[in-house]
Amino acid sequence: MIPSQMLKGTLEGCVLAVLREEEHYGYEISQRLEGYGFGRIPEGTVYPLLLRLEKRGSITASFRASPEGPQRKYYALTELGREELAEFFHHYLELNRAVHQLIKMTGGYPDAQEDEAAFGGK
Amino acid sequence: MRKKTKQLLEENNRLEEALSEESKTLLTDMVVYLRGSRISTWEQEQVRRDMTQMLLDAQARGDKPEDVLGPDPKAFCDSVIEALPPTSRWVSLLTSLRDGLLSASILAAIWLGFGILEGLLGIGSWPRLTLTFGQLLAGMGLILISCGIVYWICRSSFSSNSKKGPWVLIFLLLFALLCAGTFLSQPVATLPVPLAACGVATLFVLYKLMDSRLD
C-alpha cells in the first residue's frame, strides 16, 4: 500500500490520467486507481480533488442517469486538463529519473528482488 | 436565497428521503458542518447533491457510508471546504446582515404585537409604542446568542459530546437579557403604531430584497 503522504502530490495528476481516455464517475475513478495498483482509495478521497479540478477548469462534469438509481456525475478532461496532464507527466518523469538515479548511486534497493527488477542486478 | 439554490435545496431534500437512516444521519452531520463554513449556499447544495448521490450509489452496491467517504467524515468535509473558493468578506458581511435583518424583523414584529396587545388591554403608552433600552439590548443580545449557538452547532456537528455544550452559560445569558428587558425601562424611542408597523415591514422587505440576491 502506498502511504497517503506519498500519494498526495501525485493523485491529482493520476486522476487526470484516468480521465484521459474516457469519462468516468467518482466511484469508477477510485476503482480504476485500485486496478492500477494504488490500493483502495475511497471515493471520498477522490471527490475533493475532482471538485478542485472542476473549479480550475481542468475537467467538466455532467449528470447522467444510472441504471442503479441515482444520477451519476461524469467527469471529462478539458483542453486545460490535457495540458496539465502533459505537465504532470513531464514533472513525474523528472522526479522518477532523479529518485531512480539516487537509489542506483547509493547502493540500490535493499530488497534483492526489487533491485533486480529495477537495475537488472549489480 | 436565489431561485436556483432553492430549487436545488428542495431537490436535495427529496433525494435524501431514499437514504438509509445511517446515511441520513451522517449526511445531516456533514451538511450542518458545511453550513458553518465560508462556502456559498449554492456550492453547499451542490456538494450536498454529490454526497447524497455517492451515498445512494453506495447503498445500491451494498457498501457502507465509510467505504465511500473514508473513516473520518470531518476530514472529508474539511478537504471539500478546502477545495472550494470561500465567499468574499463582502458577501459574508451581507449574508450576516441579511440574517440579522430577518431576526430583527421577527423580534420587532413580536414587540409590535405585544405593544398592540397592551393597547387593547388599555395599558402602556398607546397609541404610541415605546422601545426601551432594555428591550433594545435584549433584542440585540438574542440575535448575537442565536448566531453563536448556530455557529457552535455547526462546528461541533461531529463531536460526540456536543450535547454537553455551553448550555448553562447560554441560559444565564438569556436570563440576564430577560432581566435587562424587564428592568431597564429608559425609553429609546416612542413611535406611533403605524410608523412602528412601517418600520417592521421595512426590515422584512429589506431582508427579502437581500435574500433574493444572495446565496
Image (cartoon, coloured by chain):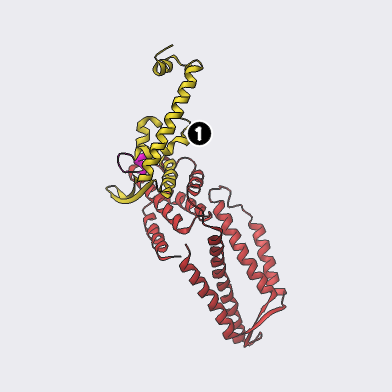
Chain colours: A yellow, B red
Highlighted magenta segment, given as a residue range: A20-29
Residue A37 to residue B146: above or below: above
Mark 1: few, some, or many residues within 10 Å (few <14, many ≥20)?
A: few
Residue B170 to residue B122: above or below: above
Rendered residue at 33%/39% (across/down): A20
Do we see residue B150 in this rendering?
yes
* Residue under numbered circle 1: A5
Q: Quadrant of the N terminus of chain A?
A: top left
In the image, farthest residue toward the left = A67
**Is A114 or B60 nearer to us in this picture?**
A114
Answer with left or right where residue B206 lies relative to residue A29.
right
Answer with left or right where residue B80 lies relative to residue A16.
right
**Is B147 or B214 nearer to us in this picture?**
B214
| Secondary structure beneath label 1 | helix
Rendered residue at 44%/35% (across/down): A10
Q: Quadrant of the C terminus of chain A?
A: top left
Rendered residue at 27%/48% (across/down): A67
Residue B2 falls in image quadrant: bottom left
**Is B182 or A46 nearer to us in this picture?**
A46
Q: Chain of mark 1?
A: A
Magenta-colored stretch includes residue A23: yes
Magenta-colored stretch includes residue B38: no
Do we see residue A1 in this rendering?
no
Residue A37: percent from left, percent from top: 38, 30
Disc 1 marks a residue whose amino acid type is Gln
In the image, farthest residue toward the top = A122
Residue B74: percent from left, percent from top: 51, 46
